[in-house]
Image (spheres, rainbow, N blue to C red):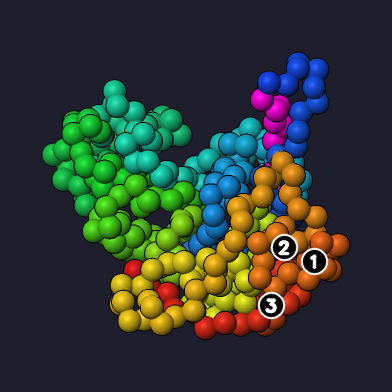
Amino acid sequence: MGPLLSVRNLSVTFDVRPPGAWPWTPSLKLHAVSEVSFDLQPGECLGIVGESGSGKSTIARAVVGTIPSSGGNIFFEDQDLANMDVRQRRVHRRDVQMIFQDPLAALNPRMTVGEIIAEPLITHEPNTSRQEVKRRVGELMERVGLLPNLINRYPHEFSGGQCQRIGIARALILRPKLIICDEPVSALDVSVQAQVINLLMELQRDMGLSMIFIAHDLSVVKHISDRVLVLYLGRVMETAESHKLTTTPEHPYSQALISSVPIPDPVLERARPRPILEGELPSPLRPPSGCVFRTRCPKVQPSCAEARPALEDIGDRHFVACPFHEAQQVLVAEA
């Protein structure tokens, strides 16, 4: 069986006008995503990690179709998103749903919980009877841990964790094939995060969902993901099986990113090596030549400024974009 989602050399750029520029001043090109490629198998969860501004959410929105790509191809079940007609795009919207970062801001405050969850179903299946809509909404509310008697309440009457469960139910009402989670637990308390993560894992297993999980917390990504893709300034630095990447990363950026996650054991925390990234993330308006990570890399060489490194397959579907890569044992906190 082929991949459910196949992304090939995806690039997304935005035209940005400098602040205070004259109307005739040419706009600048912001390179949000550059030549990103990956496959997502049916039932697989792909974690995407990286600093803010690395292009994680841009990839998600390009896959959903809310922003156009500037180059490359996105294939969903062997259909190119760029060549889809209106009918095919409507089907694509049913099969691909998103769960957003801010659970309360993602919900319409003037609609009840029942109306919020049922809206996609009524939009895409307008002939569904009211009784059937109410039945499916009630079943889904129970499935995500909400009491059906709360169906007529409004979002402001719920906690952040409950609002995220409402968002999950809304995303699942059409029985999609792919769920994209854009930092779904970053706005929640730690105790609630574990509950939501476990719920997503149960739903993925029971419903056979494929998932793209975007997050900053690498302990969470390790817990839920089958594979992990590391982004830096819109480019893939490394991708591998979750456990392998989070315990023996090869790329210097992956090593620094994973080592930045604190471990609750103070003895291990003090004893482990901690690579430190110096400097700041370069502007995507003027990315460095060659390797985009070279301005902060501890292993930088003169050749890094001349050519952009390609992803090298080092075995077992482990790809690294660094000619000077070297495996390093890294301790990572458990979710």
**Residue tagged by mark 3?**
325
Q: Are marks 2 and 1 in contact (CB under 8 Å)?
A: yes
- The answer to whether one can see residue 140 in this image is no
Q: How many marks?
A: 3
- The amino acid sitting under disc 2 is Arg
- For the point 36% across and 81% down, the residue is 268
Earlier residue among tags 1 and 3: 1
Q: Would you place residue 13 above or below residue 218 in this image?
A: above
Distance, label 1 to label 3, CA atoms, is: 12 Å
Q: Which mark is residue 304?
A: 1
**Residue tagged by mark 2?**
294
Circle 1: is it few (<14), some (14-19), or many (20+) Cα within 10 Å?
many
Distance, label 3 to label 2, CA atoms, is: 13 Å
- Residue stretch in magenta: 11-19
SS assignment at label 2: loop
| The C terminus - image quarter | bottom left
Q: Residue furthest top?
A: 23
